[in-house]
Every structure is written in C-alpha cells, then in structure tokens.
Image (cartoon, grey):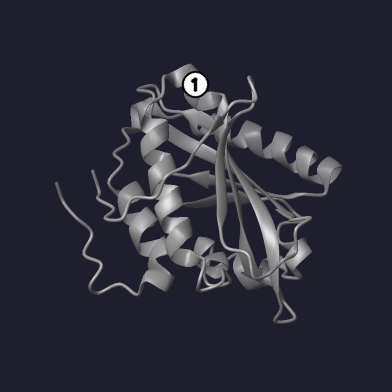
Amino acid sequence: MTKIENENIDPRNAIYEIVMKYMANLQFEPQNIDYHKLEKHKLVVETLARLSNSSIQIFDLNKNKIAFFSKNYAHLLGYNKDEFEALNYAFFEAKIHPDDKYDLAMFGLSSLKLFKELSNDEKLNHKVVYEFRMLNSIGKYVRVIDQYQILELDTTGQIWLMMSTLDLSPNQDVESSVKCQILNFRTGKIIPSSVDNKPSLE
C-alpha cells in the first residue's frame, strides 16, 4: 500500500495534494468514455443553475479538472469568470479556510473510497454534502454548502463526471468546523462519513 507522506504536507493545505493524488491514480481508457455526454450535461446544468440560482460545475476525473462552470459560478462569493477560469479548481481551493482544508481532504478521500464500493446504480443514487468556510471577494469567510453528485460513470463503472452545486449555508456560524454527510437521495438514508487518520492512495 502506498502511503501519502504527511511529513512534507501542511495539514491545512492537504486537500489539493491528497485528493488530487488519489484521483490521478484513476485510469481511464478512451473507449470507455464518451465526451458527447459531457456536452449534453452542460446544457442541462446551465439551465438548472439559472433556475435554482446555485453555482454549479462539472468535474472531469479523467482530466482531473473542472470541465464546465455555470455562467453564474461563484457569484455568491463575488468572484467573476476572468479571475478563476485559468486557475480552475486551484483558485477555489485557495479560498477554503485553512482550518477546514485537512478535514475536507479526509472526508473527500473517504467518500471516494466509499463510492468505489457501491454498485453502479447505487453510485448514481448518492451525493456527498459538505459544509465549510470559504473566503469571498471582500475578504470575509462565509459558510457554504457544496453538494457532489455523480453524473456519469465510464463503461467499467468507474466514476467519471461529478456535479458540484454550491450555495451559501443558512448557518453562518463561521466558528463551526467542517460537516459532511453522504445522502441516498432516492431513499433519504444518510450514511455516516468517517475520516481516516492515515489516508492512502489505495
């Protein structure tokens, strides 16, 4: 088992290093994914963002980057497209409260491992709901709710496209720590999310 060495990683900045390293280990074959599906999802997501006034993006695990931002993405934090489009995910990772980064990384890795064990149908029936703090454009930390849901699997059943829906949390207690729940939105069942003390790439 290959361990991620924490000695050289500031725990407060761990989310990008740990989760991205895990996702970089995922292997995709071109014949197992169809990018026409991504184009179809973009149209639906843009409509959904406009109707819900939520900020929505699609993350592509094959390319390990955000493949699509809704036009209103990050408006609730006061940022504009010119600021974040070039930096992609790294821009928003840098806005996460430093005290929340480590827990988010651990929750994210644990959630990906849990999804890996689910059947294909069950993967598509669950979403992960995070609540944490982000810095807005006027330099103030606000609590946000970020919901991740799987849009597409590749033909082998591996998670390929994920949709993130970002909203301001009704709970604006900026002293509160990270919260995470895994929800089966078909049944309403909540799966407790655990954090591994020593994350691995396996």
Residue 136, x across and y down, in percent: 70, 73
- Which residue is pictured at 82% across the width and 43% down the height? 52
Graded by Cα atoms within 10 Å as few (under 14), some (14 to 19) or many (20 or more), the crowding at tag 1 reads few
Say whether residue 84 is left or right of residue 44.
left
Count of all numbered marks drawn on residues in the image: 1
Say whether residue 72 is left or right of residue 200.
right
- Which residue is pictured at 38% across the width and 66% down the height? 14
Above or below, comparing residue 192 to residue 144 in the picture: above
- Which residue is pictured at 38% across the width and 54% down the height? 19
- Which residue is pictured at 61% across the width and 49% down the height? 68
Residue 64 at least partly seen: no
Residue 158, x across and y down, in percent: 38, 30
Q: Mark 1 points at which residue?
A: 122
Residue 41 at least partly seen: yes
Above or below, comparing residue 79 to residue 151 in the picture: below
Q: Amino acid type of disc 1?
A: Glu
Above or below, comparing residue 122 to residue 61 in the picture: above
